[in-house]
Image (cartoon, grey):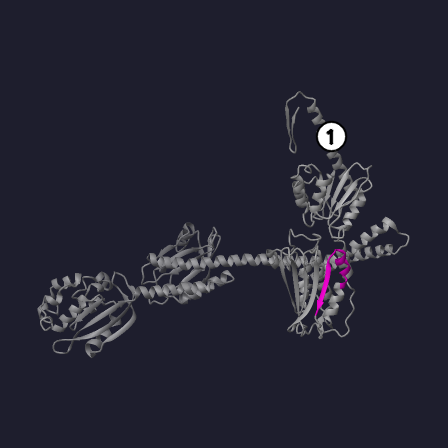
Amino acid sequence: MSEQLKFTPIDFLAGGGEMGERIRTFDWSQTPLGPVDLWPRSLKTCVQIMLTSRQPIWIGWGKDLIKLYNDPYKTIVGGKHPWALGKPASVVWKDIWHDIDHLLRQVMYENQGTYVEAQLLIMERNGYPEETYYTFSYTPIAGDDGAVEGMICANVDDTDRIISDRQLRTLTELTKSLSDPKTNEEVFQRTVNILSENSFDFPFVLLYELSGNAAQLINSTDLGESASDIPQFIDLQSETGIAKYCEEAINNRRSVVIEGLERELGTIPAGAWVVPSQTGIVLPIARRGQRDPYGLFIAATNPYRLLDEKYRTFVELIADVIITSLTNVHALEEERRQLEALAEIDRAKTTFFSNISHEFRTPLTLFLGPVSDLLGDPDIKGHNKERIQVAFRNALRMQKLVNLLLDFSRIEAGRMEPNFIPADVVSVTEDLISNFRAAIEKAGMKLIFKAEEISEPVLLDIDMWEKIVLNLVSNAFKYTEAGSIEVSIARIGNQVEIAVKDTGVGIPEEEINKVFDRFHRVQNVKGRTQEGTGIGLAMVKELVKIHGGQITVESALGKGSVFVVKLPMDGQYVSQKNEVALNPKASLSQSSSYVEEALQWIPESNGNNAVIPTEKKNINHQYTILLADDNADMRRYVQRLFDREYNVIVVADGEDAFEQAVKKLPDLILSDIMMPKLDGFGLLRKLKNNISTKNIPLIFLSARAGEESKLEGLQAGADDYLTKPFSSKELIARVANQLAISSARRHAEKEFFNLFLQAPAHIHVFKGPEHQFEFFH
């Protein structure tokens, strides 16, 4: 073992790579260390440890701390390699001597080691001052006589880690801060706040907004005493100063490096450093998809770092975060503007409905009064009385629609004042639904009422509750053609639940979440009628909410629906403004208008509730007209217009209309567009695709007004289009005209056929826009 530890001048310098070779060949006799063979054993031992270590190590020996170092240390000494070998430490590290001198004195004169972690050192190792961070320790080395003769330093380079962590922290904080700003100003302010916390990489930041050929300063980090020298406006047309860099960045859509920053701007802040940076960078800030930049990002860079690709990419990532945030703000502003526009439309619509509803009430009153008087006149009988009854029924229906619109507009405007009273919810609800029993049973269905005994009264606004129940039962009847409608009431905990269940057509899954949206109507769903405003269920939801309750719906297509209203029993929803009325005012029941309307949805039927097409046939009448409309009063009215001159077949929906058209081959078809089972457009397509019915003329009678609706009908293949309300004389004239055209066409076809029969025997082919004949004669 003792032989292995015996050193020779060559043994302790063996290996060590480049630095081992340099130390072996260096003329140490020209230094205070003297020839290698005279070095003390402790120095030789430390040199051997240094050369065989993979950690950056340097050794300083003697009072001048003559420098020796290994291969891993070359990256630390940088451009001073190999010049630094054999030089005094104070000469090699004169740029940081003020940072390490006291530490080395502690080692050499006090025999105490030191340890420093992540120490910032501005080192000039590559020809320029550079920001570096090192963790290192100085350990004293005793000579052969036991006194401190030198020191050994082990290093860890933390520069990349600390700078990368700092940049990542800035990016992370900026991304988080700019995740939810609402305005551009907020984006810029938050950007400045975050970048102010990293004044190492951004000694100062300027944010300019572009306007025409000028840029205006809108925010910046703290500029201190330099604020007066920073330009508030930049004339981009100027080719001097910082303007030329800004113009280049805008034109080329990329970052541009500014050299001589202090020369271009004047006095500038130094940020975290003692000297201001002379290098800056300007980037255009443009929202995604925007052609022209919105603004400019100008920043000074770290004076102790080169603006290399890595540093430049970091700054560009900062700009990308700002751009993303501005894009999001722009999208939010667009969405906010759209929402405000929609809200304004809603307000205008609500105001319109409120005003028009009030305006309708006066003429309706003057219409209903005289018509009601006529109905009571014993001198009016027969057809005249029937006509007045039709007018009266539809005037009541119009009054119901006007009241519905007025109520809804009052709810929208927050002017619906409830008048709560303690009420027996079971008996009140049972009385309301009983009004529908006759209509439901006439339609061949059952009305079922189930209720638990609820001893405590529930606070109800009777008028509102009437609207809620009547709308729900009416809606169930409208979309149920067979089976039953069941209304049940039960107490569950501190709530009372009222459920209206039907066995009707159900609601498509994708429409369930929309049924309570105002003006929304489920399309292409079969029912007794397609008439409606689309606000009944929306109003029900609002009225239930006024009662402090909630309404939900469950439905399966083809299996029915159940609407459930839940009301609290404790009355906590009654506000101070809406106190319980001790002497409530009696309100007029609205059930008659709902029931009258429901009765009109029941077509003429046999005992099985199947529609029976009605037909008035007279052998003296030349033409047959098929009429399809889901409104009973409209069917009777149009039938009366034509049954004196034509045979009239009357049906209530599109499917029956097609079936009768194929069976009876009428000369003309009058059809509504909005019908259950099959609408007018569906009927028209089926007629045109059937060889026996494709040439039957069809006239649409629709409440869908406007040129677009008319063009849609004509382009679909209809022969004519009349908008309700229409003149009876105009309808009669148009029907006569279409029948004449159809008759003339058939006569021409017959003559053409006879002409070919008289021609020489061969195959004749005729092609036209609607017909093709092929004869063999």
- Which residue is drawn at the image coordinates 69% and 43% (left, top)? 658
What is the crowding at mark 1: few (fewer than 14 residues within 10 Å), some, or many (at least 20)? few
Magenta residue check for 503 = no
Query: Is 689 on the left-hand or right-hand side of 62?
Result: right
Q: Position of residue 139 (x, y in %)?
A: 21, 74
Residue type marked 1: His
- Which residue is drawn at the image coordinates 79% and 64% (left, top)? 588
Q: Position of residue 470 (x, y in %)?
A: 73, 62
Asked where in the image residue 5 lies, by quadrant, the reply is: bottom left
Q: Position of residue 714 (x, y in %)?
A: 67, 41
Query: Is 26 on the left-hand or right-hand side of 549?
Result: left
Q: Nearer the viewer, residue 321 or 213?
A: 321
Magenta residue check for 442 = yes
The reply to whether residue 263 is visible in this rendering is no
Secondary structure beneath label 1:
helix
Residue on which the image places disc 1: 747
Toward the top, the furthest residue is 760
Toward the front, the furthest residue is 607
Q: Position of residue 261 (x, y in %)?
A: 36, 59
The reply to whether residue 371 is visible in this rendering is yes
Asked where in the image residue 296 lies, by quadrant, the reply is: bottom left
Q: What stretch of residues is rendered in magenta?
A: 434-451
* Image: 14 above or below 519: below
